[in-house]
């Protein structure tokens, strides 16, 4: 019954090369705890860093509430928008076919964080409008001087406003290498990565993610599998974009799990972090893997659309949780992962109280929110951690009608 919580897909055949978690370590001490009456079912999952407590009953209540609000277009879904709307695609692009699929494939290189998704779409649309041929795998693969093309793309990206942040300096090289491989082995069509008789999302992961490709975790230009820059989140994001745009059959797929999704899960206490939690990548990558299994199981069991659950979680964090005063930070001068990030003392002034009831006060899952999870720690220091309890203003302003 713990198969759903396996962080990486199980090996389907010898030599598949999946870099899965040590299952014996992960599940050896799993235990199921039940209580009397309304005490929810809690499952414990032992990881290398300690016990992650997963409350599946609470997850169901939170996910149900979010999806209901999304379906009713209640706050914040009455204004929050996903980035892959028609209006954010390049002018002159033929939508609904391979041209759009290729654009989405390139967009995914900017879905690893550090830039707003809508901004990435709009700026890459400008790049396409300036030079559409660099999105064509056949043109890219035919260029004999790939280093020159990398420089050309780099200059064009910066001219169109996509300046580099840490971790993005290799994007032009990844662009050229990935489109070349896509042309040689996948007919220049990203949708082919998901096709094949009996193909599953595990197969797509093995084709897209280098660590699952059987290439020893390294990019191999002579292998059809494994693309630069793609990890679990981006592979899921590619499947999500293609499915949501009607370019791919929408079978069950792990939702894209990024900081925003992890934040909502941790804020609500759906997954409780162990005392040994450091918040660094070795920790939060295991958390993300567990969330993929948890959300996929929920969608399959409750027959809910995995794309809509992904939207509901992601949009909530970016449009509501970001505004909670307890999540604001004082960020020091840039010093890579050593950049200082300090909390602000939370004083419930009348202005902040009003702001709370206009945002968190209208949140469809406010009743479940327990913790503060600031974004600055993650984006500046690479850490996902709890900054204390989620509190709300008391007294006069707690009676304000948020509507």
Image (spheres, rainbow, N blue to C red):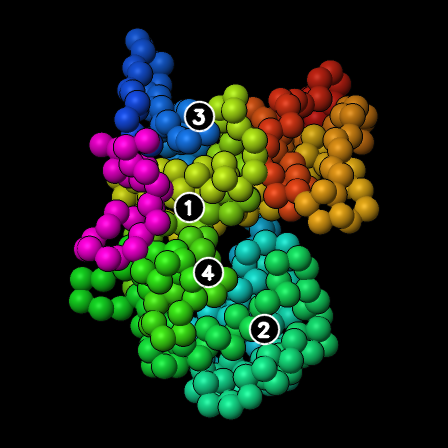
Classify the position of the C terminus by image quarter. Answer: top right
Question: What's drawn in magenta, residue-wise?
Answer: 1-25
Instruction: Assess whether residue 21 is covered by the magenta stretch.
Output: yes
240 above or below 159? above
The spot of residue 226 in percent (x, y) is 39, 65
Task: Tell me, for residue 230, which label it has, or none.
Answer: 4
Q: Is residue 223 left or right of residue 73?
A: left
Picture disc at residue 309? 1
Q: Is residue 337 left or right of residue 368?
A: right
Q: Say whether residue 346 is visible.
A: yes
Camera-nearest residue between 2 and 359: 2
4 or 3: mark nearer the eye: 3
Q: Mark 3 — residue?
A: 50
Disc 3 residue crowd, few under 14, some 14–19, many 20+, Cα 10 Å: some
Q: Quadrant of residue 236?
A: bottom left
Give 319 or 295, whichever is nearer the viewer.
295
What x and y, as percent, mark residue 240? Answer: 41, 59
Mark 1 Cα shell of 10 Å, populated few (<14), some (14-19), many (≥20): many
Query: Image quadrant of residue 47?
Result: top left
- Mark 2, secondary structure of its residue: helix
Q: Residue at label 2?
A: 172
């Amino acid at each position: 019954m713990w198969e759903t919580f396996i962080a990486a897909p199980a090996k389907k055949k010898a030599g598949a090369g999946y870099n899965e978690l040590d299952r014996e370590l992960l599940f050896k001490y799993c235990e199921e705890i039940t209580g009397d009456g309304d005490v929810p079912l809690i499952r414990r999952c032992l990881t290398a860093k300690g016990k992650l407590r997963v409350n599946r009953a609470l997850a169901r209540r939170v996910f149900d509430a979010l999806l209901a609000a999304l379906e009713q277009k209640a706050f914040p879904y009455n204004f929050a928008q996903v980035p892959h709307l028609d209006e954010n695609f390049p002018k002159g692009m033929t939508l609904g076919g391979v041209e759009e699929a290729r654009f989405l494939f390139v967009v995914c290189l900017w879905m690893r964080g550090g830039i707003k998704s809508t901004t990435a779409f709009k700026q890459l649309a400008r790049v396409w409008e300036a030079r559409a041929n660099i999105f064509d795998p056949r043109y890219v693969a035919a260029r004999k001087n790939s280093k020159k093309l990398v420089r050309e793309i780099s200059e064009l990206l910066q001219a169109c406003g996509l300046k580099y942040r840490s971790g993005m300096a290799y994007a032009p090289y990844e662009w050229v290498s990935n489109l070349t491989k896509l042309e040689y082995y996948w007919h220049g069509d990203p949708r082919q990565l998901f096709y094949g008789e009996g193909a599953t999302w595990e197969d797509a992961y093995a084709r897209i993610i280098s660590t699952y490709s059987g290439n020893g975790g390294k990019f191999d230009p002579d292998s059809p599998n494994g693309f630069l820059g793609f990890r679990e989140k981006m592979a899921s994001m590619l499947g999500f974009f293609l499915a949501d745009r009607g370019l791919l059959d929408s079978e069950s797929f792990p939702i894209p799990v990024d900081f925003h999704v992890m934040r909502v899960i941790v804020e609500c206490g759906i997954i409780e972090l162990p005392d040994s939690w450091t918040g660094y990548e070795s920790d939060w990558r295991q958390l993300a893997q567990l969330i993929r299994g948890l959300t996929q199981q929920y969608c399959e069991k409750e027959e809910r659309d995995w794309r809509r659950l992904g939207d509901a979680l992601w949009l909530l964090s970016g449009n509501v949780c970001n505004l909670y005063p307890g999540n604001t930070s004082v960020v020091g001068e840039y010093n890579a992962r050593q950049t200082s990030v300090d909390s602000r003392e939370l004083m419930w002034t009348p202005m902040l109280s009003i702001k709370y009831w206009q945002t968190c006060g209208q949140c469809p899952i406010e009743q479940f929110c327990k913790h503060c999870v600031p974004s600055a720690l993650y984006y500046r220091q690479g850490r996902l951690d709890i900054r204390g309890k989620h509190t709300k203003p008391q007294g006069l302003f707690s009676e304000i009608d948020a509507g």
